[in-house]
Image (cartoon, grey):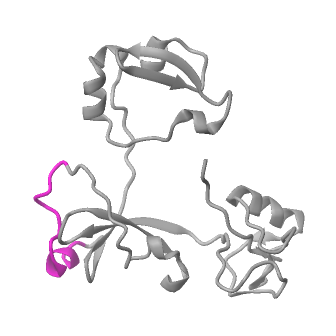
Amino acid sequence: QRVAHAAASCCATGATTASHFCDYAGERVKFASAVERCIGYDSELCDPQGFASDGCTAIGAYAWTSAACNVRAKISFETGQIARVDSVDNMDASMVKNLVRDDSINFFKVPWINKEGLPTDTASCDALPWCYSVADGCVCDTIVDETPGFSTVTDIGSKEDILATLKIGAVDPTVFGSGVYNNLGECLPGVEVYSKSNVICSDALG
């Protein structure tokens, strides 16, 4: 399982310079661990103006901060494919990882319900109040809307129904280690179901 790792950014109350408080040079930790590290040194995760020279990380290394991050989508003018763009409050774009800046070319396909209204040039992009244009696409705010694909198990007729309805994939449940997900077996022909609870197929799908 791959998860994001970076150094901690820990500030004393009111300070603008952060320390990493590493256990060894080059140490990187998960976000939750960075928060705990700062608390352990009577500090808090912060959005600093600079870092102390503590020998923990090299210049240009990534660090967790408390800055708010907005996830946007860049829509390619040419293909309609999208790329993820991370916009961090009060932070220069050059400090954001290049794969998620607004000049990213890391595009991927998405199943648009209707492509007719997609911006195809600078003018159509800039006419949208929640978007702005860049050289190769239109960067727009995003909203996450989570709705169930199926309300009850009786709504699922076949594997083909699932593939036609659920467009977002997932990693293999076995990568999370033993005991995290339970394999309920083949609940429908060709469909193997995993659940975090010890339930039967009808409960898991319903």
Expressed as whole percent of the image width and height from the top left, the position of residue 134 reads 29, 81
Q: Answer above or below: position of 151 versus 71.
A: above
Which residue is at the front of the view, 47 or 186? Answer: 186
Q: Horizontally, is 204 left or right of 165 in the view?
A: right
Task: Name the quadrant of the C terminus.
Answer: top left
Asked if the magenta segment contains residue 40, the reply would be no
Instruction: Give the prevailing secondary structure in the magenta stretch.
Output: loop
Expressed as whole percent of the image width and height from the top left, the position of residue 16 reads 74, 85
Image quarter of residue 116: bottom left
Q: Horizontally, is 68 left or right of 123 in the view?
A: right
Which residue corresponds to the image point at 47% horizontal and 22% vertical from the top-left?
193
Which residue is at the front of the view, 193 or 205? Answer: 193
Which residue corresponds to the image point at 37% horizontal and 56% vertical from the top-left?
143
- Magenta-colored span: 113-128
Q: Horizontally, is 182 left or right of 138 in the view?
A: right
Expressed as whole percent of the image width and height from the top left, the position of residue 54 reads 85, 83
Which residue is at the front of the view, 57 or 89? Answer: 57
Which residue corresponds to the image point at 47% horizontal and 13% vertical from the top-left?
201
